[in-house]
């Protein structure tokens, strides 16, 4: 039986929100881009959009939103292996909230497999989470206010003037469309950072029975 735990319930849980805030604070101290509420809420929204468009039931969509908002809490411990530590943290939190084991399994397997270094799509929720997470590239995620000291991650994210994830044709493929200011970062630099992530998006899309494509400045790249 589905539990009473909803995305709204999680979003209003002060303790979980503190984990998200502190995880982002940790990454900020390490010099990483923004991973706070703007990121996790966007990921939750897009993961839900993907599954809703593909006709999944409302509870599966709700679980994807929960996985989306909680997926980066492991960063409060360390960036290294944050997907796995986040999955363990999520298990403890959701188990204490008396969520059914079947739902917890779906969420923690998604969280534990969202990182491109070790992850892979294992169920629809994990596949949607991967795509939603890896396609969130935007200028506003850059914390560094001094362009003279940008590293490659700062440059690549700051160079993205517009990013849109959408379904194409008859919902058989997804398109990530980017507009990049090549005076800030080259397309080659973008792929140096994001190629592995985009290839994981392709695997996730295949799991969902669709294709994943990418356009940069109007040119097809994937």
Image (tube, grey):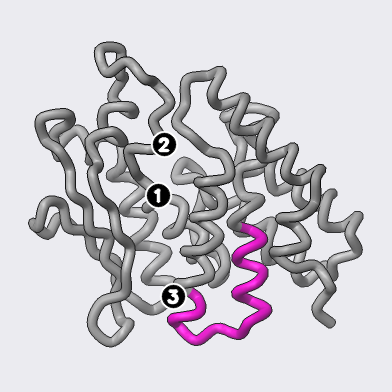
Which residue in the protein does label 2 denote? 141
Q: Position of residue 116 (x, y in %)?
A: 45, 45
- For the point 15% across and 55% down, which residue is it? 221
- Earlier-in-chain disc, 2 versus 1: 1
Left/right of residue 2 with respect to residue 62 in the rendered view: right
| Screen quadrant of the C terminus | bottom left
Q: Quarter holding the N terminus? A: bottom right
Q: How many marks?
A: 3
Please provide percent x and percent y for residue 11: 71, 55
Residue 8 position, x and y percent, is 72, 64
Q: Which residue is depicted at the point 52% across and 46% down? A: 38
| Nearer-N-terminus badge (2/3) | 2
Classify 128 as above or below 26: below
Instruction: Label 1, secondary structure: give it.
Output: loop
Disc 3: which residue: 208
Q: CA distance from mark 2 to mark 1?
A: 9 Å
Q: In screen coordinates, is 174 left or right of 21?
A: left
Q: Which circle marks residue 136 in the picture?
A: 1
Which label sits in the foreground, 2 or 1?
A: 2
Image spot of residue 41 (x, y percent): 56, 54
**Range covered by the magenta-colored residues:** 51-67
184 or 114: nearer the viewer: 184
Image position of 24 with respect to 107: above or below: above
Q: Say whether disc 1 or disc 3 marks the residue closer to the N-terminus.
A: 1
| Along the viewing direction, whichever of 82 and 62 lies nearer the viewer | 62
Judge the density around disc 3: few (<14), some (14-19), many (≥20) Cα neighbours within 10 Å: many
Q: Which residue lies at the image location 55% right of the left edge and 60% below the top edge?
A: 44
């Amino acid at each position: 039986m589905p539990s009473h735990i909803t995305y709204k319930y999680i979003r209003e849980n002060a303790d979980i929100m503190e984990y998200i805030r502190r995880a982002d604070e940790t990454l900020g101290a390490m010099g990483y881009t923004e991973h706070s509420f703007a990121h996790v809420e966007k990921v939750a929204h897009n993961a839900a959009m993907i599954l809703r468009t593909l006709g999944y039931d409302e509870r599966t969509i709700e679980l994807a939103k929960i996985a989306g908002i909680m997926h980066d809490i492991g960063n409060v411990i360390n960036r290294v292996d944050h997907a796995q530590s986040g999955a363990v943290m999520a298990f403890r939190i959701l188990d204490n909230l008396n969520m059914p084991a079947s739902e917890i399994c779906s969420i923690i397997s998604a969280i534990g497999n969202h990182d491109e270094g070790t992850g892979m799509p294992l169920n629809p929720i994990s596949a949607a989470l991967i795509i939603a997470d890896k396609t969130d590239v935007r200028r506003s995620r850059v914390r560094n206010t001094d362009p003279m000291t940008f590293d490659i991650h700062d440059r690549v994210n700051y160079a993205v003037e517009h990013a849109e994830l959408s379904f194409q044709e008859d919902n058989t493929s997804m398109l990530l469309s980017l507009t990049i200011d090549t005076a800030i970062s080259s397309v080659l630099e973008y792929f140096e950072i994001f190629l592995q992530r985009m290839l994981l998006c392709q695997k996730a899309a295949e799991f969902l029975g669709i294709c994943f494509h990418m356009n940069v400045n109007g040119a097809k790249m994937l």
